[in-house]
Image (tube, rainbow, N blue to C red):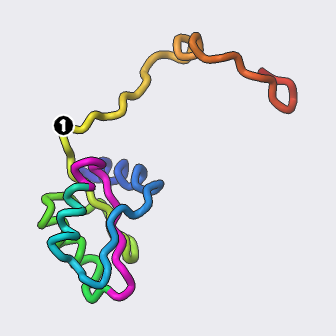
Amino acid sequence: MKGSERAELRAQAHHLSATVHVGQHGLSPTLIASLDDALRTHELVKVKLGKNAEIKPGEAAAQLSEATAAEVVQVIGRTATFYRENPELIKKKVDLRDDESRNEHAPPRSPGKRGRP
C-alpha cells in the first residue's frame, strides 16, 4: 500500500469509532471472525484493545492482520485501524457534475443572518 493511499485511509478512519473490541479473552477465534465480518461489510475498521489485554497493540495488530488478510493502516495507542478491500461491496459514488447542474435540483436556499442567498 502506498503512503498516499494509507494517508487517505487514515483520514477516512478519523471519524470512525471502534467496531471491534478486544477484551479479556484476547485474540480469540470469535474475535477474529467478528473482525473478518466487519472488514467484509465495511472495508475500513477500527479495533480497540482493552486496558487488561496482555498483548501489545502492535503485536495484536500484526496477528489480526495476518489472521484476516487485512492491512494495518495505523496503530495509535490501543486502537488499530485495518483495511481489506471487498470488490463485491458497493462503493459510494462521487458526484462529479459541475456546481450548476448539481444546484438545478436543489431547493432554494433561505437567506442567512445577513440576508445573503
- Identify the residue at horizontal 42%, vertical 21% (top origin): 96
Q: Which kind of residue does numbered mark 1 sit on? A: Glu
Query: Residue 106 at x, y = what percent?
Result: 60, 17
Q: Quadrant of residue 10?
A: bottom left
Closer to us: 84 or 73: 84
Q: Quadrant of the C terminus?
A: top right
Q: Quadrant of residue 80?
A: bottom left
Query: Residue 110 at x, y = what percent?
Result: 77, 23
Residue 99 in the figure: left or right of residue 96: right
In the depicted structure, whether residue 46 falls above or below residue 76 = above
Query: Residue 90 at x, y = what percent?
Result: 27, 34
Mark 1, Cα crowd under 10 Å, few <14 / some 14-19 / many 20+, is: few
Closer to us: 77 or 89: 89
The stretch drawn in magenta includes residue 40: yes
Counting the numbered discs, the total is 1
In the depicted structure, whether residue 42 falls above or below residue 100 = below
**Residue for badge 1:** 88
Query: Residue 2 at x, y = what percent?
Result: 24, 50
- Identify the residue at horizontal 22%, vertical 70% (top origin): 31
In the depicted structure, whether residue 95 falls above or below residue 104 = below
Residue 69 in the figure: left or right of residue 54: left
Residue at the limit of the structure toward the right, as seen here: 114
The stretch drawn in magenta includes residue 43: yes
Tag 1 secondary structure: loop
Q: Which residues are magenta?
A: 38-52
- Identify the residue at horizontal 44%, vertical 60% (top origin): 17
- Identify the residue at horizontal 87%, vertical 29% (top origin): 114
